Image (tube, rainbow, N blue to C red):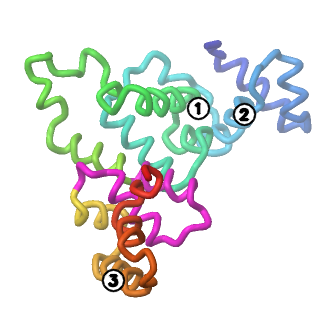
Amino acid sequence: MVKFSYEFKLNVVLEYLQGYGSTYLCKKYNIVNNSTVLLWINMYKAYGLKGLIVRNYGKAYSGEYKIKVLNWMHTHHKSYPETALQFNISASSTIFTWQRRMETKGIRSLYNKRGRPKMKKTKSIINAHQKALAKKYMVKYHYEKIKIENNNSSQFVCVNKLIHQLKNFSKIYILKIIEYPRSLYYYNLKKATLSLNKYGIEKQIKTILNPCHESMD
């Protein structure tokens, strides 16, 4: 990945402020991504000249910090550039890499080798605080993903799918993390059950209690 110097970024920012568009500047200076220029502009506006200094170059972020950043991004529905701006991370692609690594290799991959416990301590990979943060992020991440995939469904349906998707998490814990009242969940569950028609009632109950059941038939 190309690393741009402080002087180079400052020059691009100054030209942008003089009225030149980001697309023009990308072509002029052979910058591949338009969002890169916009990130520099936002960093400059938010932090001034110090926002253009690449002081995080080569910095090794802790696994806990990476999870914190990803959790904030999904909780606030922010883009990679916006998240980079929030945490003053020089390249939004860094956050994208963390996200992809977590999705394909799991949370443990967010911890660098130096910060990982030895194989003998695999069962205690993350300390109590880190583990709690990781679990919380996983629940929120899957919940947001389900809501996007089922944007026409009610909140109750999404919550119910989340509960059955994360079978290793307790129902009470999930409801607490996504801030969905337990009383409301059981009320809607009872209401949905009572509203079922007599025809095919057994199959429909299984569908409500286990969203995956219907697709397996």
Q: Which residue is mark 1?
A: 92
Q: Estimate the spatial distance between the alpha carbons at disc 2 and disc 1, rounded to whole Å.
A: 9 Å
Q: Which residue is mark 3?
A: 190
Residue 45 coordinates in the image, percent (x, y): 67, 44
Q: Amino acid at mark 1?
A: Ser
Q: Secondary structure at mark 1?
A: helix
Q: Secondary structure at mark 3?
A: helix
Task: Please tell me which of labels 3 and 2 falls first in the chain.
Answer: 2
Residue 76 appears left or right of 172? right
- The residue depicted at 56 percent of the width and 28 percent of the height is 90
Residue reaching furthest to the left:
120
* Label 1 crowd bin: few (<14), some (14–19), many (20+), radius 10 Å: some
Residue depicted at x 43% and y 28%: 104
Dot 3 amino acid type? Lys
Say above or below: 189 vs 106.
Answer: below
- Give the mark nearest the N terminus, 1 or 3: 1
Please give the residue where the numbered disc 2 appears in the rendered image.
Answer: 35
